[in-house]
Image (cartoon, rainbow, N blue to C red):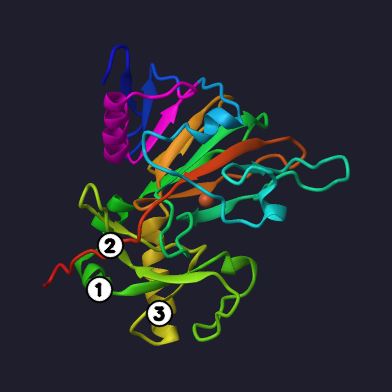
Amino acid sequence: MGMGVEIIPCSATMAAEIRGVDLSQPVGTEMAAQLSAAWHQYVLLLFRDQDMDNQQLKSSAAWLGETSQISMPTERRGDDDVEIQKVSNILDQAGKPIGALGDGEMWFHHDNSFTEAPDKATWLYAVELPSSGGNTLFGNCYESYNALPEDLKREIEGRKVLQVYDYTIREKPARDDLKGVPHCWQPAVVQHPITGRKALYLDRLMTAAIDGCSEAESDALLAQLFPYIERTDYEHEWRLGDFVIWDNRCSVHARRDFPANERRLLKRGKVEGDRLIAAPSVSA
Ligand SMILES: [Fe+2]
């Protein structure tokens, strides 16, 4: 790392804090390469005490790639800016939410898995926080894959999973009737394009089916697999000015509940990704 920059691992299996980098300023080529390498190694990077307006936030992850547009419709996005989303429970004077994904717990999930080319990274920046709660939990999906028993690894190799946009807040959709429901078949096990490592790519919030078997078999297999994804490798307790950026291809995240009568505002943005690569079969 460059002068005065430190990398401090946050847990045994994922996440590192970067000290000595001000993301409101342009990051040079050499520093960009070093941050990118650390991010791929640790899956998640934390930068504390950052002070950024929307304009600066838009280039905060330029060391990793192109900023992606928020896919949510404007009324759920809560911000005029197409590259920044407010994640908040705060209501405006008319009692209307200023942001999306307000409060309550949320199951472990990968962001944007229901799109053809899911964003490779998501970042969150803490602007207003409740007095307690609202921690974000992160799971390392390389570890999830590694922890699978051999028979389960063999059972899912080469399979695809149906990723559906927030089907849990509607009903579980029928596989043959997905009109108007954002969805995409993705590899059950992805190979990371940079690290080459295998990561389990399914979750209880978005994954509705696994291909090549009956609905009952699919439900049973997914029920066996979900617990491997739902692991907390790193729990982030937010402080104002925290900027956290993680790799969506090899991690999942979830949120703990927080007091509904307290304000919480995080800003959220994403970095564009490519189509996912299916991991080669182990038994091939
Ligand atoms: Fe998310």
Q: Marks 3 and 1, how far apart in space?
A: 15 Å
Residue at 64% from the left image edge and 71% from the top image edge:
170
Q: Circles 2 and 3: CB distance less than 8 Å? A: no
Q: Which quadrant is home to the C terminus? A: bottom left
Q: Is residue 16 above or below residue 153?
A: above
Are circles 1 and 2 on residues that touch, CB within 8 Å? no
Based on the displayed image, in which of its 4 quarters is residue 268 positioned?
A: top right
Which residue, given by chain and number where applicable, does mark 1 sit on? Answer: 158
Q: Residues within 10 Å of mark 3 (few under 14, many from 20)?
A: some
What label does residue 218 carry, if any?
3
Kindly identify which residue carries mark 2: 277
Circles 3 and 1: CB atoms closer than 8 Å:
no
Mark 1 surroundings: few (<14), some (14-19) or many (≥20) residues within 10 A: some
Q: Nearer the viewer, residue 23 or 264?
A: 23
Closer to the N terminus: mark 1 or mark 2?
Answer: 1
Query: Depth-wise, is mark 1 or mark 2 nearer the camera?
Result: 2
The residue located at (66%, 40%) in the rendering is: 258
- The one nearer the camera, 4 or 129, is 4
Residue ranking furthest to the left: 284
State which region is magenta.
23-48
Residue 239, position in %: x, y?
56, 26
Q: Amino acid at mark 1?
A: Gly
The image quadrant of residue 10 is: top left
SS for callout 3: helix
Kind of residue at disc 3: Ser
Whichever of callouts 3 and 1 sits on the residue coming sooner in the sequence is 1
Question: Is any part of residue 190 visible from this angle?
Answer: yes
